[in-house]
């Protein structure tokens, strides 16, 4: 399968929001998040209360470089997304505060860490290795950009597939990640890239 992975850039903002417009993300809650809760430099007072507002916020975040990650293309269309950002830039974002409160943030304070927060793969394209390809690209670029670790936060117990947007622990293990810490609901998994 000829999949092209592109790093999210301002000129891909239209592709990004169109992908979320057309792709179910969390069927359990029947809502589209546009991944606005996982970003860097999140300004205070942003209104994310409706899908329309989240879409507009996401578009502006991509244009400003606050939302980072990778898009997977097949046949000229976006078929996958991986949110990957610098950990230190995200510990104050709403997603981190809501979901990751127990994840340690201080033991790597002097290290450059890339965090993976989310995968979304289009229906019909799932189980074709696209998430793995996105993960490989995140790790490859992180190493080239001087990151020492890549960190991920898969669920310890999956209750519904729609809640597993963080990726499977097994996928991370196959890519060289190990469990650093077991928290109540998630694993903190790390891959060391360099000293």
Image (spheres, helix red, strand yellow):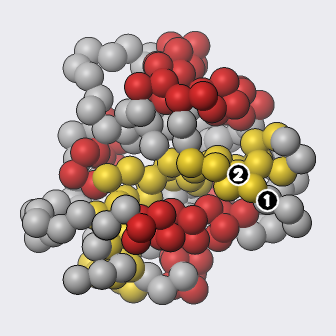
**How far is disc 1 from disc 2 in space, using C-alphas?**
6 Å
Q: Which element carries disc 1, helix, strand or loop?
A: loop
Between 139 and 185, the one lying in front of the other is 139
What residue do we see at 51% from left, 48% from top?
69
x and y percent of residue 136 in the render? 58, 71
Looking at the picture, does residue 115 appear above or below residue 76? below
Looking at the picture, does residue 39 appear above or below residue 1? above
Q: Residues within 10 Å of mark 2 (few under 14, many from 20)?
A: many
Residue 112 visible in the snapshot: yes
Looking at the picture, does residue 132 appear above or below residue 67? below
Q: Residue furthest front?
A: 144
What residue do we see at 72% from left, 63% from top?
130
Does the CB distance between marks 1 and 2 fall below 8 Å?
Answer: yes
What residue do we see at 48% from left, 64% from top?
141
Q: From the viewer's perspective, tell me whether residue 175 is left or right of residue 76.
A: left
Residue, disc 2: 72
x and y percent of residue 131 in the render? 65, 63
What residue do we see at 47% from left, 19% from top?
60
Residue 151: image tag: none
Residue, disc 1: 3
x and y percent of residue 67 in the render? 44, 36
Between 18 and 124, the one lying in front of the other is 18
Between 152 and 181, the one lying in front of the other is 152
Q: Quadrant of residue 184?
A: bottom left
x and y percent of residue 133 in the render? 66, 67
């Amino acid at each position: 399968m000829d999949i092209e992975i592109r790093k999210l850039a301002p000129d891909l903002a239209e592709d990004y929001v169109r992908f979320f417009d057309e792709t179910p993300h969390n069927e359990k809650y029947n809502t589209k998040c546009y991944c606005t809760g996982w970003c860097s430099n999140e300004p205070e007072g942003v209104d994310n209360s409706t899908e329309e507002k989240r879409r507009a916020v996401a578009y502006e975040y991509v244009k400003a470089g606050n939302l980072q990650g990778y898009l997977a293309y097949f046949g000229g269309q976006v078929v996958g997304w991986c949110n990957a950002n610098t950990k230190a830039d995200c510990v104050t974002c709403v997603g981190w505060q809501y979901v990751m409160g127990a994840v340690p943030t201080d033991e790597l304070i002097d290290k450059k860490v890339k965090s993976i927060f989310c995968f979304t793969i289009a229906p019909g394209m799932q189980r074709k290795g696209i998430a793995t390809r996105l993960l490989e690209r995140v790790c490859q670029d992180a190493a080239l950009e001087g990151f020492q670790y890549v960190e991920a936060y898969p669920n310890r117990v999956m209750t519904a597939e729609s809640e597993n947007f963080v990726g499977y622990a097994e996928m991370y293990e196959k890519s060289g990640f190990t469990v650093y810490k077991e928290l109540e609901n998630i694993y903190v998994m790390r891959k060391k890239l360099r000293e």
